[in-house]
């Protein structure tokens, strides 16, 4: 850590001088890794606490002074604002309006222009929530009475998220704050024989992401050191400060005397039902981690066909990928290395990152099993620490790193390093260790296994070289881009960027083809069928509406939604602009009855038309199956 300059500042609210660290950009970036665990939900109070704890050198003397003086709460709040203002004056880059949260929930110093996937710190949804409000009523919910006529079950209850600090676990928890009157729904048809059974039920209702919390507690070994009913009681107290009407004493008065034994097991005495929150808790505790070795053989045999239904025009790439995975499944790989390590190369928008998502969905059974590392965010050498955790002595050390935490939770994962050529040398060294030894050592010194992981790196390297081959002037076929020339251009580019020891550890370098018009038409058809699926499964008043897309729509979308440089990436925006938005407006404005009326979407004279029809008159092709059930797909005329 660099030697820090200290600035002495005399406070105006009280007669005390604080010593403020003047932090370098590197120190600020390292310190901000603390917030990764908050998943982008950062309140102003939490951020102010962080500033004071990080930047005030004589924090212990300062707190001791405040404790002995017994300062009133109003004056204390004013003092807090003054201290934070002084810290930001000394370290202007810590101004919350100059910090952003990226899509990996990492807080960073804002560059000259905010990226599309970044949120200004003060714009995150928790910034305005008062973590120190113990009244149980936020300004948002104060005075509002629950409308019981609109409530049928627990899922209909609306709530506000409030952060509360749990001292035993050393972190803020998100507690659901319900409106006054919600207790009638929450406690209806419930009978509790003990105080602890009541408290456990309230905890499972009120604590957000209760599954993850109990899994984290189990991993850290807290239940083995502290009695479970004590943990439940502490969590219940947090819930009660936010929802004072969910009080056991109030409940006991309404139902009469309840026997309270001295020895209490919080996991007994509650009837389990399909919709009970306790079922969720038990599922989380009993959940088994998925393993590559435990995969059903049929999943591996069907993997190629299932992926080709969703990833269009990349049969050769999928063949190479699936072949390597099937070899590993029967043990024909080094047992100390990951299942496979691949580089996907090719033009933008041809499906490299999408293939990784589909692989996670088909192989692991969950797209959330994809761990994405945007390498453009790890271009500086010091940023690699966010992946494995800060070293001992740095703020956030105890929380581990983004990558190592993800693999501890789900060892059987697909790890995607997007645009690998933008990563720093430090990230390459981490990848070398993963590919060679199948493990990483995190900031706490604990070894994290990658033996059940598939490593995928995407890259646009070789694209410019490929374009130069196509522009070559000469005799014969000098400008013809053959497969051999394409592969050689990519290989040469990779050799210039990566060291031989890095490339030699790869399972395969997989080249993605540029897509043809017929490929794009298939993708367009698939995206339009997805619209119908979304309409069906979003459970609105229009879920049963019959919508048919005429073949002319495919060519219309192709002309406007395919970009030579970006491939299929603009496609979804084009469908939203040309189809989804005007279709939604037509349905809402014309009050279309989905039980009696259907809609045919067609292209006519360079415009999209939406024609209605009576359901008893079936239009042509109304029962046309999706493209992946066809034996062939004929290319549409433009």
Image (spheres, rainbow, N blue to C red):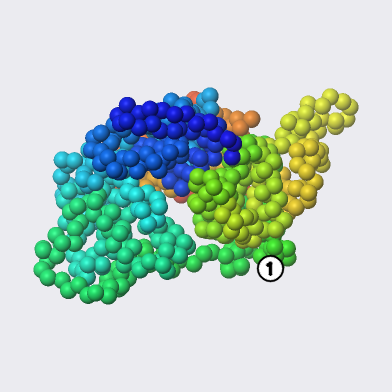
Secondary structure under tag 1 reads loop
Q: Is residue 293 above or below residue 83?
A: below
Question: How many numbered discs sit on the rendered protein?
Answer: 1
Q: Position of residue 306 (x, y in %)?
A: 58, 56
Quadrant into which the N terminus falls: top right
Report if residue 315 is visible in the image. no
Q: Position of residue 570 (x, y in %)?
A: 54, 33
Report if residue 299 is visible in the image. yes
Q: Which residue is mark 1?
A: 330
The answer to which image quadrant residue 89 occupies is top left
Q: Position of residue 341 (x, y in %)?
A: 69, 53
Q: Is residue 257 above or below residue 424?
A: below
Q: Nearer the viewer, residue 275 or 110?
A: 110
Question: Which residue lies at the image location 55% right of the left edge and 36% below the top edge?
Answer: 27
Question: Which residue lies at the image location 40% right of the left edge and 33% below the top edge?
Answer: 18
Q: Nearer the viewer, residue 353 or 606?
A: 353
Q: Nearer the viewer, residue 607 or 167?
A: 167
Q: Is residue 474 above or below residue 554?
A: above
Q: Position of residue 616 (x, y in %)?
A: 34, 47
> Left or right: 176 with respect to 470?
left
Question: Which residue lies at the image location 12% right of the left edge and 66% below the top edge?
Answer: 255
Question: Which residue lies at the image location 41% right of the left edge and 37% below the top edge?
Answer: 52
């Amino acid at each position: 850590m660099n030697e820090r300059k200290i600035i002495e500042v005399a406070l105006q609210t009280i007669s005390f001088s604080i010593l403020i660290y003047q932090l370098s950009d590197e120190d600020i970036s390292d310190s901000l890794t603390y917030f990764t665990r908050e998943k982008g939900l950062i309140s102003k109070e939490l951020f102010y606490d962080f500033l004071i704890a990080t930047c005030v050198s004589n924090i212990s003397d300062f707190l001791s002074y405040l404790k002995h003086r017994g300062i009133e709460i109003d004056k204390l709040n004013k003092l807090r604002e003054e201290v934070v203002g002084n810290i930001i004056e000394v370290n202007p880059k810590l101004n919350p309006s100059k910090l952003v949260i990226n899509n990996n929930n990492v807080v960073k110093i804002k560059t000259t222009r905010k990226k599309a996937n970044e949120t200004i710190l003060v714009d995150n949804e928790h910034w305005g929530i008062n973590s120190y409000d113990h009244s149980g009523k936020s300004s948002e919910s104060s005075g509002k009475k629950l409308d019981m006529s609109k409530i049928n079950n627990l899922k209909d209850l609306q709530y506000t998220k409030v952060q509360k600090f749990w001292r035993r676990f050393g972190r803020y928890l998100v507690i659901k704050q319900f409106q006054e009157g919600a207790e009638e729904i929450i406690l209806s048809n419930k009978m509790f024989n003990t105080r602890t059974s009541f408290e456990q039920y309230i905890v499972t209702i009120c604590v957000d992401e209760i599954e993850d919390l109990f899994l984290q507690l189990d991993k850290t070994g807290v239940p083995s050191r502290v009695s479970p009913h004590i943990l439940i009681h502490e969590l219940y107290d947090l819930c009660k400060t936010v929802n004072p009407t969910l009080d056991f004493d109030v409940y006991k008065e309404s139902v009469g005397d309840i026997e309270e034994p001295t020895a209490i097991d919080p996991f007994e005495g509650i009837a389990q039902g399909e919709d009970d929150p306790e079922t969720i808790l038990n599922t989380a505790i009993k959940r088994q981690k998925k393993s590559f070795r435990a995969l059903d053989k049929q999943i591996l045999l069907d993997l190629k066909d299932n992926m080709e239904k969703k990833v269009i025009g990349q049969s050769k790439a999928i063949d190479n990928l699936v072949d390597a995975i099937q070899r590993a499944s029967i043990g024909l790989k080094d047992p100390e290395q990951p299942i496979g390590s691949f580089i996907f190369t090719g033009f933008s928008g041809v499906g490299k990152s999408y293939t990784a998502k589909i692989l996670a969905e088909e192989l692991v059974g969950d797209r959330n099993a994809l761990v994405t590392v945007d390498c453009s965010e790890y271009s500086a050498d010091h940023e690699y620490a966010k992946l494995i955790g800060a070293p001992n002595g740095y703020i956030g050390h105890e929380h581990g790193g983004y990558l190592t935490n993800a693999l501890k939770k789900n060892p059987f994962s697909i790890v995607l390093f997007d645009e690998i050529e933008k990563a720093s040398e430090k990230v390459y060294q981490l990848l070398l260790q993963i590919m060679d030894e199948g493990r990483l050592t995190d900031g706490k010194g604990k070894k994290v296994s990658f033996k059940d992981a598939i490593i995928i790196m995407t890259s646009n390297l070789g694209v410019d070289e490929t374009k130069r081959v196509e522009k070559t002037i000469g005799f014969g076929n000098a400008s013809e881009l053959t497969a051999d020339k394409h592969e050689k251009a990519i290989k040469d580019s990779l050799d210039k960027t990566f060291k031989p020891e890095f490339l030699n550890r790869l399972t395969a370098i997989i080249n993605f083809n540029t897509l043809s018009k017929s490929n794009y038409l298939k993708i367009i058809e698939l995206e339009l069928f997805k619209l119908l699926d979304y309409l069906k499964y979003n459970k609105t008043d229009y879920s049963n509406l019959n919508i048919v897309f005429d073949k002319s729509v495919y060519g219309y979308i192709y002309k406007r939604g395919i970009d030579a440089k970006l491939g299929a990436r603009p496609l979804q925006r084009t469908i939203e602009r040309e189809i989804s938005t005007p279709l939604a407006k037509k349905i809402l404005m014309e009050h279309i009855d989905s039980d009696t009326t259907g809609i045919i979407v067609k292209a006519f004279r360079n415009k999209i038309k939406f024609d209605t029809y009576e359901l008893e008159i079936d239009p042509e092709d109304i029962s046309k199956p999706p493209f992946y059930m066809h034996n062939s797909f004929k290319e549409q005329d433009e």
